[in-house]
Amino acid sequence: MKHGISELDWNDYLDRCAPQDVCDRIETHLIGCLQCWEFYERVSSATRDLQDAAEEARARITPEDRHLHRMLSGVFARVRAAEPKGDLHPQVKGRLSRLETVLAPFCGPQAAVCALQAAARNSPAASLDQVTLDNWGPFLERLTAIAAAMCGETFAGLVRESGQY
Amino acid sequence: MSSSGAEGYLAEILQVEDKHVIEEFLATRSDEAFCAVFEAACVRVRRYFLLRGLDAATADDMTQNVFVKVYREAGQLREADRFYGWLFAVARNEMISYWRREAVSDKVQLEPLEKSHAANLMTEPEVLPALRIKQLLKALDPPERDLVVLRFVEGLSYEELAVALKLPLGTIKWRIFNARKKLSRIAGPLPAGDARKQINSRKQIN
């Protein structure tokens, strides 16, 4: 701390987010202290230089859309390549988890898992770990039918709705 | 993104729609929402790598690695406000791992860019080497370069910087101020009266 102004105060002041009393204290001091005044001028100048340079960097480092598209394809390729067979797609995982959450309070956690497994077994997926976005529709239909048998049509409607997104 | 301390130059890069896109992705984890997040954030991550000295091909490669992690691990994140802090923490870890892998001697060289990568920067010849920010960053230590790029170029708030760099808020501010002081030694002074004008305009605003 120099002349009663801490480095954090200076930094906040330069960012224009210092509390009013700190601003007043610094500005009152600057009027009478040439050393701090010169220091402030130098740091202000550096900050402005930095802001201009940052703006230039943002404006000039801009890859073309097709470059970004290539990179996005690359990301998906890496994700798919790294997925072990049978590993569930994150979206499928999310949907299954949501369905389990909906089912469990009505029929208990174990029965909820059993219902999911039975629906998968009786759908084109054949097992729960083979459920994908492509075979999701038939799986959900089977689960809805099971839910209807267990808890009635209203609850089955809730299950269908929960499994659609 | 918190706007505490953000000035006009930051406002333009703080896009409100970014937050909606991120919230959508965190809620649904769908491929479509991920694409929107990628579109919003990919340029920033890639630019961070380029400004920290990686050549264009490596920056592209590592940006893709970062977004593979985003795709897989965003489930651990609950609040959209913390996304950019978390994203740049992932990016920074990726970069540190890269430097460690690249270090060939006994001594871990944490800043290989100046010599070994200078030639590769020619992949974007007309832009990168000529940027003023590159000259300014040379005056700083590596940890300060991270801070300056993330704060001034990418517009992260101090709170996001604390998440990204896993440092206390006070330390972040102190280091930013030190970086400003260092840069003030290579910057020219303000034209006479400029700082005075800034104070006067601030008083008028208040």
Image: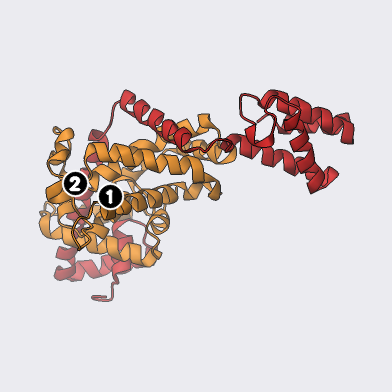
Q: Position of residue A2 (x, y in %)?
A: 23, 75
Location of residue A156 by image quarter:
top right
> What chain letter is assigned to the residue under label 1?
B
* Quadrant location, the N terminus of chain A: bottom left
Which residue lies at the image location 79% right of the left edge and 29% below the top edge?
A144
Colour displayed for chain B in the image of the structure = orange
Q: Give amino acid for label 2.
A: Ile
**Secondary structure of the residue carrying numbered label 1:** helix
| Left or right, A79 with reference to A7 | right
> What chain letter is assigned to the residue under label 2?
B
Chain shown in red:
A
| Left or right, B30 with reference to B109 | right
Q: Give amino acid for label 1.
A: Val
Residue matched to label 2: B133
From mark 1 to mark 2, how far is it between C-alphas? 9 Å
Q: Position of residue A136 (x, y in %)?
A: 66, 27
Q: Position of residue A35 (x, y in %)?
A: 14, 70
Q: Nearer the viewer, residue A50 or B118?
A: B118
| Left or right, B119 with reference to B17 | left
Residue matched to label 1: B149
